[in-house]
Amino acid sequence: MNTVTSKDGTRIAFDQYGAGAPIILVLGAFNERPTGVPLSQALAAHFTVFNYDRRGRGESSDTQPYSIEREIEDLDALITQAGGSACVFGYSSGAILALRAAAHGLAISQLALYDPPPTGAKAGTLVPQLTELMSADRRGDAVELFQTEAVGIPAEIVARLRHAPFRPALENMAHTLVYESTILRALPDGLVASVQTPCLVIDAEKNPDVMHQAAQSLAEALPNGRYRLLEGQTHDLVPAVVAPVLEAFFLSR
């Protein structure tokens, strides 16, 4: 494990794999570094991969108050560590964070976004609700609210997941769901159109229609955007499928 220090003093933990052009993985909600390990290893033959814990989770520290700008500064610190510019892969809500970072002007040479979720008012309404639940230390309720309202998991399935072995890990990350919901608020007018970075938007075939619509609309709105449907895939990252797509895109320039 390595660390970099963000502008506000937050310690960001990361692992580094392979050798070659740098790629930074930006993971989404309920994810820490272990989620990115299989994909990092699959890409390591051609790239130097930086797989990090976003602030407030894993072995990274946290600094309040939270802001999207501070998360962008975290990514900027990693880009500096990588040599001053890097390709970036964003997964789920991490894809929206990566998009915001590109619009902010970070030195991102190419951008690949896997299953970027819809953004808008619904996420905004979750922020005060999740904040209130966390103030009362109701971590389990925060997890379930995000699962039903943001992820769209049916309530009956959420109820069955209460005793799943991974539930404690989700509750440990519950405070970061406020961060995710903040990121998923409506994007400022003109933000997507301002991103000139070459971008591949990847959409898993077995996603619900709302996810397909979000991915297609984003790809069309990006000045240098491309859309790729991954047949037979779900929202889960499958390195054997995703890595070749990323290699072809990131090695194309």
Image (cartoon, grey):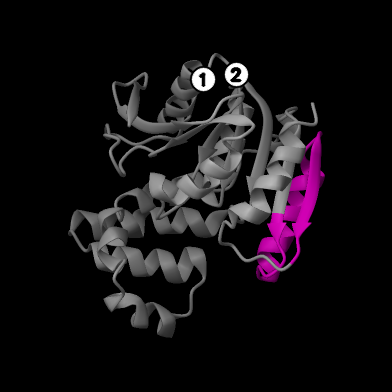
Highlighted magenta segment, given as a residue range: 203-231
Q: Is residue 71 left or right of residue 241?
A: left
Q: Where residue 82 is drawn, which disc sits there?
A: 1
Look at the image and tell me in which quarter the C terminus lies.
top right
Q: From what the image shows, is residue 4 above or below residue 129?
A: above
Q: Could one spot residue 32 in this view of the protein? A: no
- Judging depth in this view, the residue of 66 and 62 nearest the camera is 62
Kind of residue at disc 1: Ala
The location of residue 172, given as percent across then percent down, is 25, 55
Alpha carbon separation for disc pair 1 and 2: 7 Å
Q: Is residue 129 one of those drawn in magenta?
A: no
Residue 194 percent location from the top left of the image: 72, 29
What's the residue at 74%, 42% (across, down)?
Answer: 200
The magenta stretch spans residue 220: yes
Q: Are marks 1 and 2 in contact (CB under 8 Å)?
A: yes
Q: Secondary structure at mark 2?
A: loop
Q: In the displayed structure, does residue 50 sit left or right of residue 88?
A: left
- 68 sits left or right of 232 in the view: left
The N terminus - image quarter: top left
The residue type indicated by label 2 comes to Ser
Comparing labels 1 and 2, the label whose residue is closer to the camera: 1
Residue at 54% x, 55% y: name it. Answer: 121
Tag 2 residue: 85
x, y percentage for residue 140? 26, 67
Residue at 31% x, 74% y: name it: 164
Q: Residue at x 77, y 46 (%)?
A: 219
